[in-house]
Amino acid sequence: MPPHAGHPVSETLPPQVRVHVLGAGPVGLAAAALLQSSDRFSVHLYEKRREYTRTRMVQLAPYLVADSIASYCNDYIDGESVEAIFEPSELAEGLAFRQSIPTDLMELLRGWTVGFCPLNAIERSLSDLIDARHAHPVTRTAGAITAQDAATMLESGDVLIDCTGTNSLLRESLAPNAGAGDGSANTFKLRLEYAIVVTFLYGHAYDCNEYCKYYKNIDNAYYKFIPAVKRTFYDGHVTHVTGIVNITAEDFERMPSRFDGAWLRGNFPQVAQSMDRFIAKVKTETNGEIVGDLDIIRIPLDLYRARNSTSLSLHLAGTGEHPFARSPVFLVGDAAMGSPYFQSISLGFECAMFLAGLLMQRDLPLAQMLARYEQFAYKQWLRVYMRSKMIKHNKDLFERIGDTFALLEQLHIY
Ligand SMILES: Cc1cc2nc3c(=O)[nH]c(=O)nc-3n(C[C@H](O)[C@H](O)[C@H](O)COP(=O)(O)OP(=O)(O)OC[C@H]3O[C@@H](n4cnc5c(N)ncnc54)[C@H](O)[C@@H]3O)c2cc1C
């Protein structure tokens, strides 16, 4: 490492470490809760939102609480990719770290892997858990942090963890050539498609599977309404349904960011008809009614990752005057990578666990710590990329069912 880069290669973190966690969404909270349990860290948590209001139903992946390599690789799609990408020793290390997770946190994780839960309930539970632990209180700061604030707050030996989500506060600051381009030098992004996400409550038990997606869309040549697998959840009173309808880039431009069913019916009748046909079939089958209105948002479905998920490149480039070249910075959660199709919270928790495991290794030289996190994040990205591309391909095939030639063109066997 160049002599002016701030940390010699062999330097380790000091015995007592101040860790700044930016963003108290699910992943920032999980990172804070993991580090809080060690005497070594004083954790500072920064959050701009006053309340946790996101009520969408989410479920965490069982691999988060796996206790063996076999159970970690249990998912029939993901399992093979995991075994192809990670060495057995890496998987064993991750499992060993899980054994050290405090019981209060592990209990919460276990609960979230077996049933659906509103996102804000996860956030509140983690936040309450952090506040209830008196041994190592976490210092909280309310309000929006800027990249400048983050740079100024750093003292020698501090660690900075950016958990500020998709529009990460620091992602673009971690590219050595940041400022030379359009401000996205550190983000690799694939726009897979555009969609509307339709969420509603249904006053009867309703479970969706692949056959249901097909049969209920049989009359929908375009704008198929697709409840994601495991995106329906019956809580004993109502079923929470989240469905996705692909739209064109032009449709996307003409829609507001959030609207209801009436607006969709008035402005995009073709999209609404497909959705209503699907819902009508659900009603005929189960004799229920929609409770309340439909909540609809339009989103671009992007698959992305940070090319640099730490400040390692800045260290190596020897840009010693750059504030993030002198301190270890890590991107975790949606700040580091994201897929529109699945389990991003679990992915973020997984990265938070790995990072906490690294930070707890007292003798690990800083440069190695950064390099190991980079490698881990890249491997997680490969896992996400493979699964996302498979889902996108299956969706494309699904859209063409009924049109044999279009389907064959999409198949690409060999
Ligand atoms: C419609 C929809 C459905 C989804 N369904 C699922 C699902 O079923 N399962 C799943 O796993 N994932 C799902 N996701 C994705 C999931 O919500 C995200 O992956 C997850 O919220 C990411 O967590 P995070 O903590 O990394 O980021 P975020 O949840 O975005 O949290 C970032 C936090 O940082 C704070 N923050 C940002 N900037 C600043 C700043 N400058 N200063 C201070 N604080 C700041 C924000 O207020 C926020 O609290 C879904 C997403 C969408 C849009």
Image (spheres, helix red, strand yellow):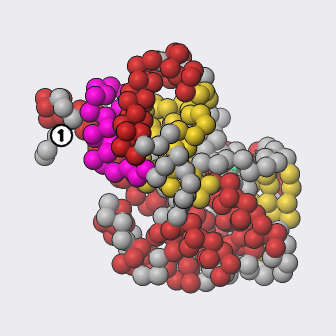
Question: Residue at left 27%, top 47%?
Answer: 211
Residue type indicated by callout 1: Leu
Q: Does 351 sit left or right of 85 as displayed?
A: right
In the image, the segment drawn in magenta is 206-224
Question: Label 1 crowding class (10 Å Cα cut-off): few <14, some 14-19, many 20+?
Answer: few
Residue closest to the eye, 362 or 12 = 362
**Residue 117 visible, this angle:** yes
Q: Position of residue 326 (x, y in %)?
A: 73, 58
Q: Is residue 113 above or below residue 254?
A: below
Q: Is residue 223 magenta?
A: yes
Question: Residue at left 46%, top 60%?
Answer: 380
Q: Position of residue 359 (x, y in %)?
A: 66, 73
Question: Residue at left 13%, top 29%?
Answer: 405
Question: Residue at left 45%, top 24%?
Answer: 272
Q: Is residue 263 magenta?
A: no
Q: Quadrant of residue 16?
A: bottom right
Prevailing SS of the magenta stretch: loop
Q: Quadrant of the N terminus?
A: bottom right
